Amino acid sequence: MTRHALVRPLAIAAAVSLSATLAATTVIADDGLGDYRDRFEPLPHLPPIPAHNSLTDEKVELGNMLFFEPRISASGVISCATCHNPALGWSDRIPRAVGHDGQVGERNTPTVLNSGFLEAQFWDGREPDLEGQALGPIEADIEMAMDLDMALERLMEFEIYQEKFAEAYPEDDNPINKDNLAKALASFQRTLNTPNSPFDRYLRGDMEALNEQEKRGMQAFVDTGCIACHSGPALTDSNFWAIQVPGSTDVGRYEVTGDEADMYKFRTPTLRNVGVTYPYMNNGATETLEEAVAIMGQEMLNREFEDETIADITAFLHTLTGKMPDFEVPALP
Amino acid sequence: MTRHALVRPLAIAAAVSLSATLAATTVIADDGLGDYRDRFEPLPHLPPIPAHNSLTDEKVELGNMLFFEPRISASGVISCATCHNPALGWSDRIPRAVGHDGQVGERNTPTVLNSGFLEAQFWDGREPDLEGQALGPIEADIEMAMDLDMALERLMEFEIYQEKFAEAYPEDDNPINKDNLAKALASFQRTLNTPNSPFDRYLRGDMEALNEQEKRGMQAFVDTGCIACHSGPALTDSNFWAIQVPGSTDVGRYEVTGDEADMYKFRTPTLRNVGVTYPYMNNGATETLEEAVAIMGQEMLNREFEDETIADITAFLHTLTGKMPDFEVPALP
């Protein structure tokens, strides 16, 4: 595994040129399901980049270091990568997050993969973007439990962080600050995308990329109404819907707004890589994708799916698993 | 970063052929310090491989997965890589290890780098080899706090582990067992070596690999007697010596043997990569290498080193930092 800073620029460049190439691909055959395909969008290689946080190699490289940096946690051993573990689909594959002093949180850890495509962050959407999200887990008592000013002080102790922050934010006199910490982490996360899943290749014209069962699943996904909320490139509308899954008493977005209308509402999760980001639901109490599909049919669509339909939709959902992103385990100071 | 299983065999092959090449290198010049160089040994690319645990690509690949596998911990979030963090010199860079439920251990985490060269494992040498060491932290209440049988049961739930254990131990009917878990972890750790440090290149004939101060440090290291215990390719005799560093009441090896003669004895730590494996001493209470050198002079050599001597020896110790090993963050099931 290389640690060249050069890897990252190449990665971004490759992503851009490759997406351009693929966008140009023309449909070379037809299986008669064009009306279904038209309901979906392939995943771009990069998400929208906000005007206030341009995506630069310097920020991405710094964000990569910070994402794996455990010394911005109170214990000194918990980093973003502890719960968003690259070996585990950039999540943790346990029902609910385990953080500082082994405290167990209320909710299942969302993957950071493709999180740049979401228009609301956290299960309850309490932050609109990755810049707003990035600092939350560092400060949360049950996660990294770290005072942000102390985290910044720890970073300032390292010459390499002074250099990297200065390179990433050359216009700032004191670049090691909360905003820049958040912007660097957000920039790195925007590079963690999984394009070119079998379904993306199918949408781009490779009729062989999905088998018959997977195509039946795609049709059922549309016909039964899953797509009403799971739409767009990340298969989420980034909107909030009331749901109480088995075992959950979590009031969801109501905690954020205090508005009765938001009781039990949660943001629609992305279905990208859902096959490798088990367990499921806000409380992580659902172990298998088949169970998750059945529960969503009951709770959101008021339908009892046939076993065959569940199998077909599950097969389709597995085609949403893309190539895991290249990244570097940084050499930290 | 690639995850090809092929990377590993190539790595081993390269290591072997490369070490053969380098062993053949002849001294091309002389700085008159041959008598000093003769007291040292360059680090081989692989440590001795025990007859009962041949080093195979299958075991190394499996061990690589297991090393990063948090689900063999009680919390489901602590893996070997949590404290032996590849981003932090395969250690944790905090004074004492933080484990299950945030419990803080008694001792500083030793790096796993080059640990295959040590003839005694743990600070107190309670295990002779990596096979004996591997399971300890999984079971330790303050580390991963996991019952070994439960750990094995969790692994058995994954088809991929059934396959990988069967490939690694084709002669076993039930390959997922404690011995094979230990052997796979030990095999992976034996590939985590850091040859070709500046000092290794110097010992192999590159007279320019060390500057004048570093060479003065090497001479002081020999002349003052550091080399009496810090000898051999890993710069440790793997023997036990009584020492009470500032702030430590740890009785060390006495806990293992119950022999009064072993009170306060600890295994001589390797000095390989000591420049990147701070903080120092059994209690991790010593922050800088300069302090560590001064303390060792006082405690073990009964000398008050001059500041210049401390600076020279410290400069020499930094030449023992080699190239960090290639490895893969595995894609876990």
Image (cartoon, coloured by chain):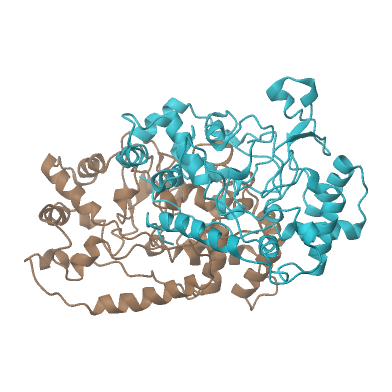
Chain colours: A brown, B cyan
Locate residue B232, reporting x and y percent: 70, 47
Q: Relative to residue A215, is residue A45 drawn left or right?
A: right
> Could you tell me if residue A182 is visible in this image?
no
Work out whether residue B142 or residue A303 is closer to the camera in this orientation and state it. Answer: B142
Residue drawn at x 48%, y 70% is: A8
Work out whether residue B2 or residue A21 is closer to the camera in this orientation and state it. Answer: B2
Residue drawn at x 23%, y 52% is: A317
Locate residue A26, reporting x and y percent: 17, 77
Q: Relative to residue A172, is residue A290 drawn left or right?
A: left
Q: Relative to residue A256, is residue B32 drawn left or right?
A: right
Residue drawn at x 7%, y 66% is: A31
Up the image or down, A168 lies above or below A268; here it is: below
Q: What is the quadrant of the C terminus of chain B in the image?
A: top left
Residue drawn at x 29%, y 56% is: A321
Res. A232 image quadrant:
bottom left
Up the image or down, B267 lies above or below A206; here it is: above
Q: Relative to residue B277, is residue A215 drawn left or right?
A: left
> Could you tell me if residue B176 is visible in this image?
yes
Locate residue B35, reporting x and y percent: 80, 58
Work out whether residue B307 or residue B33 is closer to the camera in this orientation and state it. Answer: B33
Give the tally of numbered discs.
0
Locate residue B243, reporting x and y percent: 82, 35
Q: What is the quadrant of the N terminus of chain B in the image?
A: bottom left
Work out whether residue A42 or residue B44 is closer to the camera in this orientation and state it. Answer: B44
